[in-house]
Image (cartoon, grey):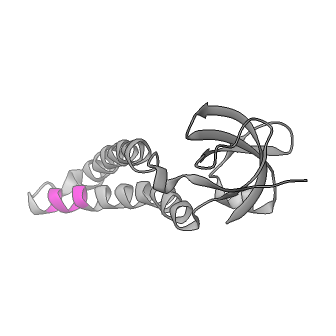
Amino acid sequence: MKEQGVVVRVISPRLVEVALQKNEACEKCQACHPAAEGMVAIEAVNEIGAQRDDIVEIEIPAGEVVAASFIVYLVPVFFLAGGYLLGAYLTRVLGFDAAQEAVGIVFALAFLACSFLFVAWYDRNVMRRETSRARITGLLKL
């Protein structure tokens, strides 16, 4: 997904923050964070040496956005359901049928907590890689 924006901050020689005009796709994507009114901002890899106030074209890797959305939204749901089913199954196998639902709920909550740890790990270790970040592809001249 290609977008145009303005470099608002140089974080490091290889990383800048780019402000983009918010559009309809922003509601579904969530790759950016809120900035000024009607704007969103995203950190982008700066391989071309863009400076503050430069107008740039960036490319946001669509596959990474889809993968991150899956991890953030669906993995916790799967962990929750899997935890409940595992807890209920174990109580049935061990002969504690009376506590089946309660143990299922406890397992579901424990697995949900584990899923949040997994999502945090994923964000820290996978999404912070340069290959997963937006990348400046060109400097635009007006």
Q: How many marks?
A: 0
Report if residue 119 lies within the magenta region. no
Magenta residues (range): 86-92
In percent of the image, x 36 and y 42: which residue is there? 117
**Residue 123 sits in quarter:** top left
Relative height, residue 105 to residue 25 (above, below): above
Where is residue 13 shown, x and y percent of the image? 57, 35
Q: Residue furthest left?
A: 94
Where is residue 88 shown, x and y percent of the image? 24, 59
Q: Is residue 6 left or right of residue 128?
A: right
Q: In this view, does 51 lie to the left or right of 64?
A: right
Where is residue 129 shown, x and y percent of the image? 44, 49
Q: Is residue 113 left or right of residue 63?
A: left
Which quadrant of the figure contains the N terminus?
A: bottom right
Q: Nearer the viewer, residue 99 or 61?
A: 61
Q: Nearer the viewer, residue 47 or 67?
A: 47
Relative height, residue 13 to residue 95 (above, below): above
**Residue 100 sits in quarter:** bottom left
In percent of the image, x 10 and y 63: which residue is there? 93
Report if residue 91 lies within the magenta region. yes
**Residue 27 sits in quarter:** bottom right
Relative height, residue 49 to residue 2 (above, below): above
In percent of the image, x 41 and y 58: which residue is there? 75
Q: Which residue lies furthest to the right in this view?
A: 142
Q: Which of 61 and 90 is in front in this view?
A: 61
In percent of the image, x 58 and y 66: which residue is there? 62
Type of secondary structure dominating the magenta stretch: helix
Where is residue 59 shown, x and y percent of the image? 65, 60
